[in-house]
Image (cartoon, grey):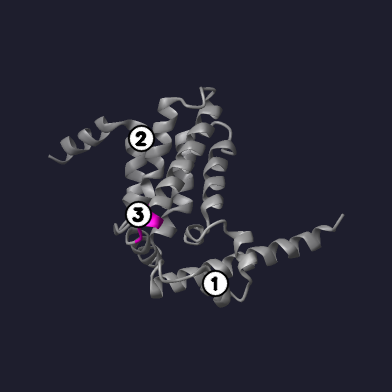
Amino acid sequence: MPDSPTVGRRERKKAATRQAIADAALELFLEHGFERVSVRDIAEKADVSTTTLFAHFPSKEALVFDREEEVEAELTAAVRERPEGQSVVEALRVHALKAWVSITSDPRLHQHNALVDQTPALREYAERMWMRHAGALGAVIAEELGRERDDLACSALARFVLEIPILANGRHDPRAVVETVFDLLIHGWGSQQDSEVDRT
């Protein structure tokens, strides 16, 4: 059995190769358009074989969403591994503030989103990915609350939470977006109406 340093080096090398492929793909897609770039073009730019490329990414579309599995794992871990006494919604709020605010502030996100919006195949892939994330998160929330896997309230909460990065995109204060949405989830629309009354 290999020792842990060897395993660590192997995993780091694998992660570096995966990142190099994803970076090369995005650069080519942004420069030439998704449809005009071939998998062979990406492999050549990343200096890997097409076999290696497909060992890391199952499809051309997946190259654009290289953190897909990581994002879902982080979401479910935020719920499963939350501190004792912390509610599911609060755990998701903490995760959103930590993981999503910095991402929505990244200027490269605008280019990425524009590429997806302009490419039908990527829009379809993104919608399927969003649904998978929503299903996985809803199931974990239901499990943690002792409810049926397809519990409607848990599924709705998962979908609301996953809309936050979309709502925050392009806004000048993404942190305020996260706080506003979670305030709405925790306190309901009545709290928003009360705020309007307070301002009049």
Decide: is 60 above or below 33. Answer: above
Direction from residue 198 to residue 70 in the image, left or right: right
Amino acid type of the residue tagged 3 in the rendering: Pro
Check residue 185 in the rendering and tell me which mark sits there, or answer none.
2
Could you tell me how far apart the alpha carbons at marks 2 and 1 are, in whole angstroms?
Answer: 46 Å
Would you identify the image quadrant in which residue 198 lies?
A: top left
Q: Is residue 137 left or right of residue 117?
A: right
- Percent from the top left, x then y, of residue 116? 37, 59
- Residue drawn 34% across and 38% down? 183
Taking the spot 51% from the left edge, 28% from the top edge, the residue there is 142
Q: Earlier in the sequence, mark 2 or mark 1?
A: 1
Q: CA distance from mark 2 to mark 3?
A: 17 Å
1 or 3: tag closer to the N-terminus: 1
User: Residue furthest toward the left?
Assistant: 200
- Amino acid at circle 1: Arg
User: Image check: 83 left or right of 120?
Assistant: right
- Where's residue 74, x and y in %? 55, 47
State the residue position of label 1: 40
Location of mark 3 (residue): 174
Identify the mark at residue 68; answer none if there is no mark: none
- Secondary structure mostly seen in magenta is helix
Q: Nearer the viewer, mark 1 or mark 3?
A: 1
| Range covered by the magenta-colored residues | 119-123
Q: Tell me if label 2 and label 1 are in contact, CB under 8 Å.
A: no
102, 33: nearer the viewer? 33
Q: Residue at x 44, y 53 (%)?
A: 100
Separation of residues labelled 1 and 3 (CA atoms): 38 Å
Can you say which quadrant of the picture contains the N terminus?
bottom right
